[in-house]
DNA sequence: TTCCAGGGTAAGC
DNA sequence: GCTTACCATGGA
């Protein structure tokens, strides 16, 4: 096992990993456990000093990949300063400052959000866990002696068949995931090339995949490809926008999407994540 | 029971 | 361009 400590500013580990942008993190007695880039990773944050500690298996001596995943070198203050000073957004930032957008693996991010449609986050986590246990490579052994699995590759998932995927409780999403896995593993779509394209082209390319519409494309663009303007509109965000920005009157989804384009600025997706986390936490506590 | 969940799609206005 | 039914599955 390798260990490393990161001295960070404006970083809230609980808000970051608990805000529904990645589905493989588990919090057990204050310690987060997950898998990133083929490594089993445990993360804690000192409540006083805010120092971040990472323990990983297998060992490494280069930690740049983790700095990238956690976006430690992003100057959060600049991002937050760019937000419009809307009441609800100011409230969200005041409460959750330190929430970061992760920089996830494109395939894992795309695949897990294909599974996310009309599913609660706990159920998405359950489906993803089944998928990893059944088709992922073993990368470590945890403290109980249980295997720790990598997220399955596109090539692997493309080869297992629809019935085996449906068996992971993903229902009607199975054919979509299967088709995407095959499109990517056979080279028809190069995910890494998408990163270099303009936002609109990247978005259109992703939306050609079955089961990938505007929302899921925006999630991948924001959480994996680093397009800070991408603004996923799901049921929670639609609710927040209509309640706080349109006086509670029902607004068509396309109208909401065009509104956020001009309103939230160059880091709109970041603002979206603060709004999303804030209202979800509000609804949990009530 | 009924409603709802980090939606997408195709058919119908 | 916007609305609706349908798609599995399980939690509340």
Image (cartoon, coloured by chain):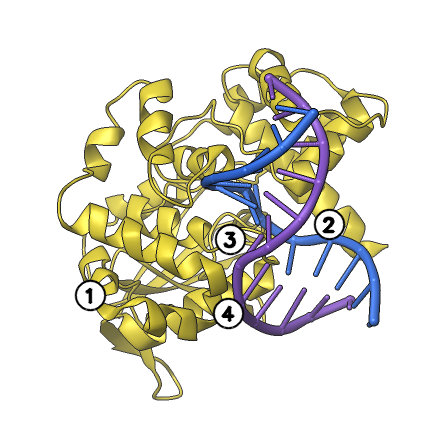
Chain colours: A yellow, B blue, C purple
Helix, strand or loop status at disc 3: loop
- Label 1: chain letter: A
Q: Nearer the viewer, residue A113 or A8?
A: A113
Q: For marks 3 and 4, give the CA distance.
A: 11 Å
Tell me which corner region of the image, top left, top right, bottom left or bottom right, holds residue A3. Answer: bottom left
* Residue behind mark 4: A126
Q: For marks 1 and 3, give the CA distance.
A: 21 Å
Tell me which corner region of the image, top left, top right, bottom left or bottom right, holds residue A156. Answer: bottom left
The answer to whether dots 2 and 1 both sit on one chain is yes
- Label 2: chain letter: A
The answer to whether dots 1 and 3 both sit on one chain is yes
Residue A246 percent location from the top left of the image: 80, 21
Q: Is residue A47 visible?
A: no
Q: For marks 2 and 3, give the CA distance.
A: 19 Å
**Of all residues shown, which one is farthest toward the bottom?**
A145
CB-based contact (under 8 Å), mark 4 and mark 2 = no
* Residue behind mark 1: A159
Q: Is residue A227 left or right of residue A139?
A: right
Q: Nearer the viewer, residue A169 or A56?
A: A169
Sequence-first disc among 3 and 4: 3
- Label 4: chain letter: A
What's the residue at 30%, 57% (across, down)? A178
10 Å crowding of disc 3: few (<14), some (14-19), many (20+): many
Helix, strand or loop status at disc 4: helix
What's the residue at 59%, 23% (across, down)? A257
Q: For marks 2 and 1, give the CA distance.
A: 39 Å
Which-is-in-front pick, marks 4 and 2? 4
Sequence-first disc among 1 and 3: 3
What's the residue at 18%, 55% (across, down)? A61
Which-is-in-front pick, marks 2 and 3? 3
Against A192, residue A172 (above or below) is below
């Amino acid at each position: 096992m390798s260990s490393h400590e990161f001295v960070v500013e404006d970083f809230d580990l609980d808000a970051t990993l608990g805000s529904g942008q990645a589905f493989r993190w588990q919090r057990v007695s204050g310690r987060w456990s997950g898998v990133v880039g083929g490594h089993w990773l445990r993360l804690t944050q000192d409540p006083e000093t805010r120092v971040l500690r990472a323990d990983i298996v297998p060992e490494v001596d280069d930690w740049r990949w983790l700095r990238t995943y956690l976006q430690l070198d992003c100057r959060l203050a600049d991002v937050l300063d760019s937000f419009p000073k809307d009441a609800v957004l100011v409230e969200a930032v005041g409460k959750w400052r330190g929430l970061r957008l992760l920089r996830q693996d494109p395939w894992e991010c795309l695949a897990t959000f294909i599974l996310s449609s009309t599913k609660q986050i706990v159920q998405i986590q359950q489906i993803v866990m089944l998928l990893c246990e059944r088709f992922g490579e073993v990368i470590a052994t945890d403290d109980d002696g249980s295997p720790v699995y990598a997220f399955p590759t596109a090539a692997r998932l493309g080869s297992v068949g629809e019935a085996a995927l449906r068996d992971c409780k993903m229902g009607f999403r199975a054919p979509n995931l299967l088709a995407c896995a095959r499109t990517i593993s056979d080279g028809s779509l190069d995910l890494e090339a998408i990163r270099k394209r303009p936002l609109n082209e990247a978005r259109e390319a992703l939306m050609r995949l079955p089961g990938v519409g505007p929302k899921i494309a925006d999630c991948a663009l924001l959480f994996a490809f680093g397009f800070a303007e991408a603004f996923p509109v799901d049921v929670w965000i639609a609710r927040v926008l209509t309640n706080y920005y349109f006086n509670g009157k029902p607004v068509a989804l396309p109208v909401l999407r065009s509104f956020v384009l001009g309103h939230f600025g160059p880091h709109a997706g970041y603002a979206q994540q603060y709004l999303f986390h804030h209202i979800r936490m509000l609804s949990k506590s009530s």
